[in-house]
Image (tube, rainbow, N blue to C red):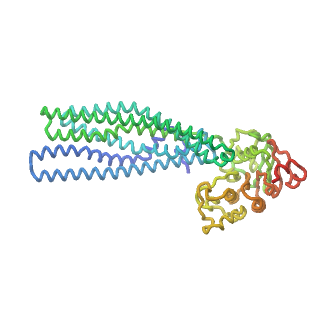
Amino acid sequence: MKTADSQRPRPGSDILRTALRRNIGAMAGGTVLMGLYQAGETAFPIALGLIVEHTMQDRSPGALALSIGVLAVIITTVSLSWRFGMRVLQKANTTEAHRWRVRVADCGLEPVARDAGLKTGEVLTIATEDADQTADIIEVVPLLISSLVAVLVAAVALGLADIRLGLLVIVGTALILSVLSVMSRRIGSSTREQQARVARAGAKVADLITGLRPLHGFGGNHAAFRSYRRVSTEAKHQAITVAGVHGAYAGTATALNAALAAAVTLTAGWLAFDGRINVGELVMAVGLAQFIMEPLKLFSDMPKYVMTARASAERMALVLVAPPVAAHGAERPAAGGDLEIDCVRYGALRALKFQVPAGEFVAIAAYQPRAAADLAAILAVRVPPHEYEGVVRVGGEELAALSVEAVREHMLVNPYDGEIFAGTLRTNIDPSGTSRTVAEAVEASLLTDVVALHREGLDHGVRDRGANLSGGQRQRLSLARALAADSDILVLHDPTTAVDAVTEQLVARNIAKLRRGRTTVVITSSPALLDAADRVLVLDDGVITAEDTHRNLLAADAEYGLAVAR
């Protein structure tokens, strides 16, 4: 169940605040443990300075043993606090990244598409890289606080030795952060541009993979590869730019931190030479000057990570706050299954009008493939009702008044290029595991030979996109999934183009038998399916030009015979 919090719009700053709020407990625990780690690190040179001072004065084995014990406690505290602190923070980071990946994926899988202006590959990049980088804020804040603690402890300890040393650390840290905060803005803008270009390259790859076969078919693969190379090169150049900016940032941070450490060391040496601090305080100051470089580096890296997390959160917001492409109603279609297309104009369709009563098996012979694709897209609710003229009625209710979930429960539109997913034959046929007609669907689609080939039967493994199946097997598997859904209205778009004529004949008869009494519409030019239908509608130039049985149309319409003859 989705809460109101998960549904409300989230700009990038809101996403970061939500991530921080949800993990406040883990961050508090991580901050305490990492603060202990940094305090222990800071305490080490302080303790070393005190040990040197008191051991030189007392020169007793007892004082030396006590000093060794104190150092052992400090080292143990440092080791355990780091181990458990990072474990807490990284667990929270990983969990939060998973939550945002699920949210982005949920938006992509919603029945009504969102108007984000992004391609599938871009959404994939946002759901992976950007989700991970956004969740990094969970670690950044505790590390920032613990580093600040370390710097303040060092500044206080040095200030107790000599106020000038403490002031030098505080002023130097403020100057370093001021310089780096300016540079971090460039990192944020460069990172946003890099993420956008990487996402575009990912989208281009997804498009190429999907269309690789047709590209090879008409020789367009080389042009497509050149297009991808251009997009990839742009992403590479931007990545190099970002790397250069990061390098300049890191180099500047290291140089400034080293300069501050050197200034502290030289100032402490001068004060010791002048007799204003003792030998123990000098050892402490030199040790702290060396140690302080680590928290300063971590502290100075935080603006970079914050800007990167913010840029990623803003890209996630593109998906999460995008409005749906259409607003549908909340009604449900009446049981039965009648379908009516009333004067629909869209794409290649011109005032298309026909009606399919409940329980009838109707085939639509579309002479133009574009018209068939446009009709299938409208019935699959991939086209918002406001983008076409006319009315589509399902179960007597207008499509625009129905909820998309209800439409898809009532009417299933199976595309000619239905996706095959990694898993098993069974999980592809019945993803929800609730169908009662899996066996009948397997038999009707003639997938029985594929099941019989393998010892595991329906539990035989299927690779991503059905890579270990032939074209005909993939198509029959997709058909079996559509039949197993047992919906009131089933719309099939070219379900048998990849199977041989004999198999096609048997499949057509099986569909008619299995779907008897249920509304079935097949958009096809297959003679076998046309012959199995109760009625054939001829779709030519965007309108229905003829209507009869397949055999009557063959006898009376020469053009029809030429269009469907094989």
Q: How many marks?
A: 0
- The answer to whether any part of residue 170 appears in the image is yes
Residue lying at 23% horizontally and 45% vertically, measured from the top left: 43
Residue at 70% from the left image edge and 43% from the top image edge: 400
Using the rendered image of the protein, determine whether residue 491 is visible from the camera's viewpoint. no
Name the residue furthest bottom.
Answer: 455
Question: In terms of depth relative to the viewer, which is nearer, 447 or 43?
Answer: 447
Image quadrant where one finds the C terminus: bottom right
- Residue 226 lies left or right of residue 402; in this view the side is left
Picture coordinates of residue 99, whole percent (x, y): 49, 49
Of 473 and 440, nearer the camera is: 473
**Quick check: 393 left or right of 54?**
right
Q: Position of residue 263 (x, y in %)?
A: 24, 33
Depicted 248 relative to depicted 405: above or below: above
Compared across the picture, whether 531 is left or right of 219 comes to: right
Q: Position of residue 343 (x, y in %)?
A: 79, 41
Q: Position of residue 548 (x, y in %)?
A: 86, 52
Please tell me which residue is depicted at 61% across the width and 45% down the height of the picture: 208
Q: Pick the residue in front: 308 or 2.
A: 308
Q: Give me the residue at 60% from left, 65% from top.
A: 459
